[in-house]
Amino acid sequence: QFLLKDKQTLEDSINKQTEIELPFILGREHWGVTNKVNHPYVGENEWNKGTFVFKGQQYSAENLKYDVDTDKLIYLSYSSDFQMNCIALDQNFVSEFSIQNATFRYFDNLVTQRGVNLRKGYYEVVYDGKLKFLSRKVKSKSFDDNSLYLNYKLSTDLFLIKDGKLIRVKSMAKLIAQLSDKKKELKKYVRDNYLKLNLTDYSSAAKVLKFYEGL
């Protein structure tokens, strides 16, 4: 009776923790990829510390991955018998998360200048001022020549949000062209600071936009 009582107390404690402290565990089981080279995750295939916003409240976690292929934030949890479970958190309730020094936000109403609706999902928020600069990552999978292994190919699109519309940006020249009222100052700033912008290195967009909005 003593052992059963202790077991029940432990189970009650875990259930209470799940309901109160971990209310975000309501997604689907996620089958993970163990390959360290070919995988669908952003960055390295490692569990990372991070934060996320669930129903307006921020939570911290020690074990997160962002699956680019399925566009899901993955959380590693432990059951009452200490088994590991990978859970794809429901994007209907997780509006934003930060992982590996990058912040991703869920958008479902993005429209280009030509009126084209973009795919809803998580976009990396590179700059978040009056103007916004976003990066959209996609990992497409295919089998190799021997049809034995899945290969994941990463592609990236960059967007400036101006006047509520998305403008695709591929270079620093394209970005400056959209900020033409301060073109002279921006060109000098970029030249003096040796800034560049492309699909693999776009962090400088935040510096340029911050400088622009400060003028």
Image (spheres, rainbow, N blue to C red):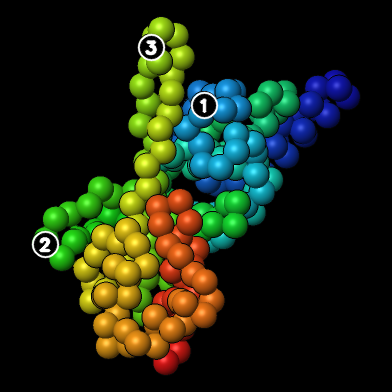
Outermost residue, bottom direction?
Answer: 215
Residue wearing tag 2: 114
Q: Position of residue 171 (x, y in %)?
A: 34, 62
Q: CA distance from mark 2 to mark 3?
A: 39 Å
Quadrant, the N terminus: top right
Q: To which residue does mark 3 refer?
A: 145
Residue 56 in view in this figure: no
In this view, the mark in front (1 or 3): 3
Label 3 Cα crowd, 10 Å radius (few <14 / some 14-19 / many 20+): few
How crowded pointer 2 is (Cα within 10 Å; few <14, some 14-19, many 20+) is rated as few
N-term-proximal mark, 2 vs 1: 1
| Residue 77 pos. (x, y %) | 63, 35
Q: In the image, 176: left or right of 167?
A: right
Q: Residue at x 39, y 82 (%)?
A: 186
- What is the distance, in whole Å, between disc 2 and disc 1 at their CAs? 36 Å
Q: Amino acid at mark 3?
A: Asp
Residue indicated by mark 1: 38
Q: Is residue 108 visible?
A: yes
> Which secondary structure, mark 2?
loop
Crowd class of label 1 (few under 14; some 14 to 19; many from 20; radius 10 Å): some
